[in-house]
Amino acid sequence: MIMREAITKIISLIGDEYVVCANGFISRDAFNAKDRPRNFYMLGSMGQASSIGLGFAMARPGKKVVVLDGDGNLLMNFGVLSMISNISPKNYIHVVLDNECYDSTGGQPTISPRVDLARAAEGCGIKNVIKKDLGQDFAEAFKDCLKKEGPSFILVKVGRDPSEKVPRVGIAPPEIAKRFKNA
Amino acid sequence: MDATTLKTRLKGLGFDFFTGVPCSLLGGIITALAGEYIPAVREDTALGMAAGAYLGGRKPCVLMQNSGLGYSLNVLTSLNMIYDIPVLMLVSFRGYGGKDAPEHIIMGRHCVELMETFGIRNSVCGREDLAAALAEADKEIAKGKPYCIFIKEDTLE
């Protein structure tokens, strides 16, 4: 399963949850799969989708927050795993779509094939940690995490399609923020 | 200003989400905020979390040493400033006047112009002007912008 298919699948399983999307193809794929006010598209600030989701989860404890993160993003802000564990928001679901590369800059490899991101999340003490290899279905695990008490960390290995042509997010950043805040 | 007074002033202005990375100059206020202050592992992560809290309806304040401004810059310029996400930064001014440990000298020399370069409004405060700076910061924050209050040594008791 390639990134876009994985994101399309995740978005189709989302109900009223808030979704924070990492920069690059994750935001673009989510925007093109199904734009909705409860999606926050992070355009810059690489690494910070997980932090934004964490702050939002603390501010709105009654709402579920799904972070769609990438391996490059997580590796850049690796310390966030320790903070997620320390704060342990019950409404926080961290999905890491690991395509083992920096896709939007041309597919340069990340070091994620040699780093067990799921074990790192476990080592930090995150409550529910799930790992799905390339080709494994993650839908049931994701649905389960939407229901149960978090924080949850789901690592999904995905492929990439270099021919993918995905339009950029077509909404101005202040509007993305405003509608997410008021949604 | 003592730390408890600063806490009261911040609360009075509606700030209700506190995170950051410590500095010895900010020790008092972090202690005063105990129970509410959320430790971050890096300053950029603190700003990211504060941005999320703002989107969730909170009014965030991030505490850090000026050394953390380097890490913070990308988040300020590519998140806060383009999405109109405000934040109050209380930044300890290490290296002020060229007197400090060697690691603080260069950032101390340039941190104010760094903020100026990026168009981030700021004040450099001692004991007398902290209250006025908070009022000024709050106006800027109401416009959806970040504001940086540099706090010199001996400003907070």
Image: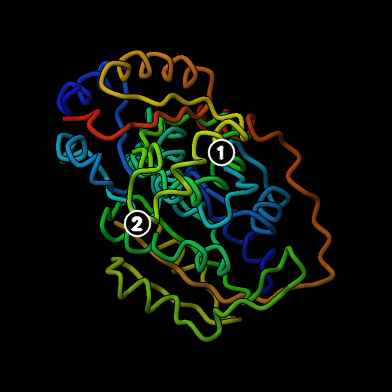
Q: Amino acid at mark 2?
A: Val
Q: Nearer the viewer, mark 1 or mark 2?
A: 1
Rendered image quadrant of residue B125: top left
Residue shown at the point (38%, 75%) measured from the top left: A120
Estimate the spatial distance between the alpha carbons at disc 1 and disc 2, rounded to whole Å.
23 Å
Q: Say the numbered circle drawn on residue B114.
A: 1
At mark 2, the secondary structure is: loop
Rendered image quadrant of residue A11: bottom right
Residue shown at the point (43%, 20%) measured from the top left: B137
The foreground one among A74 and A164 is A74
For residue A60, say whether it is visible: no
Q: Residue B142: x, y in percent? A: 48, 17
Q: Quadrant of the C terminus of chain B?
A: top left
Q: Amino acid at mark 1?
A: Leu
Q: Residue A141: x, y in percent? A: 44, 69
Residue shown at the point (49%, 19%) measured from the top left: B140
Q: Residue B64: x, y in percent? A: 35, 43
Q: Is residue A107 left or right of residue A48?
A: right
- Mark closest to the chain's N terminus, 1 or 2: 2
Q: Say the numbered circle drawn on residue B61.
A: none
Asked if marks 1 and 2 fall on the same chain, the answer is yes
Identify residue for label 2: B41
